[in-house]
């Protein structure tokens, strides 16, 4: 393998918590975190905010309770664990004062947001609200395989992952213990449609982080429940997935950002992680700038070197990564190189070992236009 001659300084960022921290002037944080796990913060008379703990570096997921006709709607659920189930029972008997839960709404299929959906829907015998693609992506997710499938092995080989690290990629399938059995039916959410339980809430679909992520907007309340599509101080993970290796997810996510740029700055954003904030448009601009800088680091690094996606991980994340975080980092790198390759900024060649190597294309100064689908 050729010796790398890096032409740009690297930046220290943690893949699962990429800090794109805002200055106090940029966005406002009007609420402090809940003081205890089972005591929600009242955002408004009909919206409450809870935090569920997670055993990861990103140690929490935000949960919201929305008052609708007949009771409360749970928005996202947390992982399935005995601790989380216990917290929910405390919430039901305490802060909700015995009032009914009438529905469970999941923004997307990731386990921290949907882990207890089945348990809660069954406990209250209420419907699950999800988009079509999110529900069936989760329903179709394979069980933990005994060995790496050949299609996945080929995906990681082309990305340049060393053969000895291949067994570690199975960690992405090992989440069955953190999710309760999913309901066998659901109520489909659609972009620009209204929440069946309250017409004042409108569904707003975003893409890139997951297939059909359902945000929830109330113009009357000036509240946007954004899930993971818009976060206040970390950059949403956008990855090329081994399950959909020819996708261009970053183009979908950046297009969704353009749509979020229309949200007024006085709207309160309730994110999936971090603190509620105001300043959606300013946050969108920060994230757009973050990705422009990342594109430039990749282009500069590939000017004098033919680099694989795995080698670019070392450029962008020059520190030790867990098995899980390495896959997030690799997926992020693939999303960025796919975006640039689809727009003619990078060209890919397959070397003698079957690894895709990327080189900057000289003379192009913009990353706009081009097809949304390409190989490379």
Image: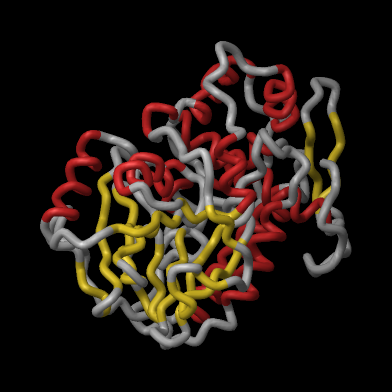
Count up the numbered dots.
Answer: 0
Give the side of residue 201 with respect to residue 137, left or right: left
The structure's colour scheme is secondary structure
Q: Is residue 216 left or right of residue 91?
A: right
Q: Residue at x 55, y 35 (%)?
A: 327
Determine whether 259 is above or below 80 in the image. Answer: below
Q: Is residue 289 visible?
A: no
In this orientation, which residue lies closer to the viewer: 163 or 98?
98
For residue 272, what is the image quadrant?
bottom left
Question: Which sits in the foreground, 296 or 141?
Answer: 141
Can see residue 297? yes
Residue 113 to residue 175: above or below:
below
Is 297 positioned to the left or the right of 15 in the image?
Answer: right
Q: Residue at x 33, y 40 (%)?
A: 56
Residue at 54% across, 55% down: 187
Rendered view: 346 above or below 139: below
Residue 366's image quarter?
bottom right
Is 16 in front, or is 280? 280
The residue located at (32%, 68%) in the rendering is 70
Q: Quadrant of the C terminus?
A: top right
Residue 95, given in percent of the width and then of the height, sits at: 14, 62
Horizontal relation, residue 83 to residue 4: left or right: left
At which x and y percent is residue 192? 62, 73
Q: Position of residue 344 (x, y in %)?
A: 86, 56
Where residue 258 sits in the image (x, y, percent)? 64, 74
* The N terminus lies in quadrant: top right
């Amino acid at each position: 393998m050729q010796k790398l001659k890096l032409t740009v300084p690297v930046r220290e960022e943690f893949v699962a918590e990429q800090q794109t921290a805002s200055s106090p002037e940029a966005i406002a944080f009007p609420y402090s975190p809940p003081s205890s796990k089972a005591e929600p913060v009242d955002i408004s008379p009909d919206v409450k905010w809870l935090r569920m703990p997670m055993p990861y570096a990103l140690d929490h997921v935000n949960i919201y309770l929305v008052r609708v006709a007949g009771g409360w709607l749970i928005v996202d659920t947390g992982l399935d664990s005995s601790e989380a189930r216990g917290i929910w029972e405390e919430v039901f008997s305490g802060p909700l004062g015995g009032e009914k839960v009438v529905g469970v709404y999941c923004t997307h299929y990731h386990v921290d947001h949907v882990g207890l959906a089945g348990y809660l829907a069954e406990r209250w015998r209420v419907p699950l609200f999800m988009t079509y693609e999110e529900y069936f992506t989760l329903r179709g997710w394979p069980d933990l395989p005994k060995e790496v499938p050949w299609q996945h092995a080929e995906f990681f080989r082309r990305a340049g992952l060393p053969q000895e690290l291949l067994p570690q990629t199975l960690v992405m399938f090992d989440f069955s213990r953190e999710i309760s059995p999913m309901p066998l039916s659901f109520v489909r959410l659609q972009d620009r449609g209204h929440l069946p339980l309250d017409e004042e809430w409108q569904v707003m679909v975003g893409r890139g982080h997951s297939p059909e992520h359902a945000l929830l907007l109330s113009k009357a309340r000036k509240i946007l429940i954004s899930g993971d599509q818009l976060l206040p101080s970390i950059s949403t993970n956008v990855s090329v997935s081994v399950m959909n290796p020819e996708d261009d997810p970053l183009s979908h996510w950046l297009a969704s950002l353009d749509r979020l740029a229309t949200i007024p700055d006085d709207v309160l954003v309730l994110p999936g992680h971090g603190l509620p904030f105001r300043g959606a448009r300013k946050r969108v601009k920060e994230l757009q700038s973050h990705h422009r800088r990342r594109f430039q680091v990749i282009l500069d690094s590939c000017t004098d070197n033919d680099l694989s996606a795995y080698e670019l991980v070392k450029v962008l994340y020059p520190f030790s990564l867990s098995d899980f975080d390495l896959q997030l980092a690799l997926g992020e790198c693939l999303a960025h190189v796919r975006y640039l390759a689809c727009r003619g900024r990078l060209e890919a060649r397959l070397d003698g070992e079957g690894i895709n190597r990327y080189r900057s294309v000289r003379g192009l100064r913009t990353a706009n236009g081009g097809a949304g689908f390409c190989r490379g």
